[in-house]
Image (spheres, rainbow, N blue to C red):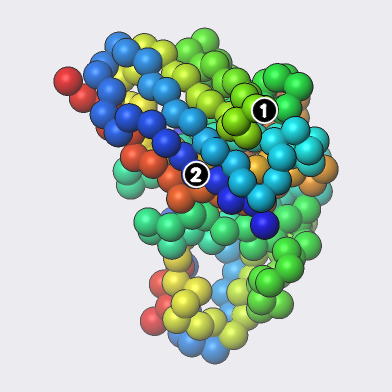
Amino acid sequence: QSALTQPASVSGSPGQSITISCTGTSSDVGSYNLVSWYQHHPGKAPKLMIYEGIKRPSGVSNRFSGSKSGNTASLTISGLQAEDEADYYCCSYAGSSTFVAFGGGTKLTVL
Amino acid sequence: QVQLQESGPGLVKPSQTLSLTCTVSGDSISSGSYYWSWIRQPAGKGLEWVGRIYTSGSTNYNPSLKSRLTMSVDTSKNQFSLKLSSVTAADTAVYYCASYALYGDYLEYWGQGTLVTVSS
């Protein structure tokens, strides 16, 4: 069982927006602005999409955005494109005992 | 741009030790900008953080693996390594190495991953 809870799957049509939630606790997501999101196409290396909750690395489309409210972080993808179809994982710093917690992953299907 | 490449045996027998090495290029492993980290993904499952090591040799491990895990750094070769002892089928996974940003706590660059199967 993963430390952070994500929906197993989400879907949307091209051009639409979707949001993936990532629910943790006051020991991880709720205590730190250190949530990151990764896009993972099977067979490839995961790719950093969002870090520190809301920041985008250079080269990542501004269609990807992050937010947080309480113990839940969210990744929003606007203007869905076929190439966005992938697995998405959230990750949070979880303090000096656990250090890192991952979500179970969400499979995004672009219809 | 930092590049990472995992290497090691693809098949390990149960009860033996799994050993992997990650070779870093594009940055010195001693630069101090990153922890160097391992993550794994069992087939059909999500990502699991294994541990991280700093250039000084300081380590942080997943508590569930801590008793079996050893990580090390070889600055002369710009490599870091993972040893997981007493493996079982549950340790079968794709193992990724990655750079873990010292400030911001995120995994910035990843290797392609290597499949390790535990089987007799």
Left or right, B87 with reference to A16? left
Give the quarter of the figure containing the C terminus of chain B: top left
Residue beneath the point at 73% across and 55% down: A51
Picture coordinates of residue B6 (x, y %)? 46, 39
Front residue of A41 and B34 = B34
Q: Earlier in the sequence, mark 2 or mark 1?
A: 2
Q: Above or below — where is B73 with respect to A20?
A: above
Q: Nearer the viewer, mark 2 or mark 1?
A: 1
Q: Residue type at mark 2?
A: Gln
Q: Chain of mark 1?
A: B
Q: Is residue A72 visible?
A: no
Quarter of the rendering containing residue A58: bottom right
Q: Is residue A85 visible?
A: yes
Left or right, B108 with reference to A67? left
The label on residue B5 is: 2
Residue beneath the point at 51% across and 17% down: B69
Q: Above or below — where is A57 with respect to B77?
A: below
Q: Chain of mark 2?
A: B
Residue beneath the point at 76% across and 22% down: B56
Q: Above or below — where is B97 with respect to A51?
A: above
The residue that disc 1 covers is: B75
**Residue sitting farthest toward the bottom:** A15
Left or right, B5 with reference to B79? left
Picture coordinates of residue B103 (x, y %)? 82, 43
Q: Residues within 10 Å of mark 2 (few under 14, many from 20)?
A: some
Q: SS at mark 2?
A: strand
Q: Residue type at mark 1?
A: Thr
